[in-house]
Structure formats: C-alpha cells, structure tokens
Image: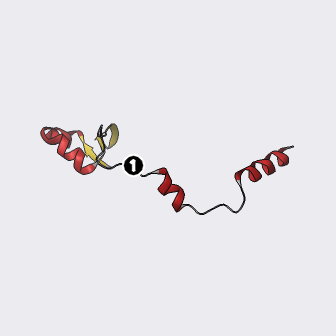
Amino acid sequence: MRHISIREIRSELSRIEEVVDREGELVVTRNGRPLVKIVPLHRSVSPPSHADLRASMPRMRRSSSELIREDRNARG
C-alpha cells in the first residue's frame, strides 16, 4: 500500500489505473493525514485458498470439542 499526497495524485490522475495496478492500494493524504483509500475493484491476484491455509497450519493435539468442553466445565 502506497501513501500519496493530494498533489501527487493530481499529477498521476491521467494514469490512475496504471498506478493502482502497480501499487495495489493507494492511501491519499492531505497534510500527512490519511484522507481516502483507493483500491482496485477487481484484483489481478486471486486470494489464497482456505485449503492451502489449513494445510500450512500445524495439527492440534486435542480436538476442538475437547477444548470447548474443558472451557465450559472451568466456567462452572
């Protein structure tokens, strides 16, 4: 994500699509404070799959149901 001032965005406005494609997201600032965020409507990169995320996580030693049961019992 790139921070860009109002003055810079005005000069880049004619090629905003190119800038957003290159940078992904832009945060437009005024006097150093964030004013607006520009994001592409359609991302060129697809989001990661949930299966890949689950595969990368270590397996739990105890099941979720055991942990929930233990938590409920501890609360009274």
**Total label count?**
1
The residue closer to the viewer here, 5 or 27, is 27
Residue identifier under label 1: 47
Q: In the rendered image, which quarter is residue 25 located in? A: top left
Across and down, in percent, residue 4 comes to 26, 45
Depicted 70 relative to depicted 33: above or below? below
Question: In which quadrant is the C terminus drawn?
Answer: top right
Q: Is residue 19 left or right of residue 46?
A: left
Which amino acid type corresponds to the residue marked 1 in the rendered image?
Pro
Q: In the rendered image, which quarter is residue 17 located in? A: top left
Residue at the front extreme, as displayed: 51
Residue at the right extreme, as displayed: 76
The residue closer to the viewer here, 13 or 66, is 66
Describe the element under mark 1 as helix, strand or loop: loop
Res 69 seen here: yes
Q: In this view, does 55 lie to the left or right of 15?
A: right
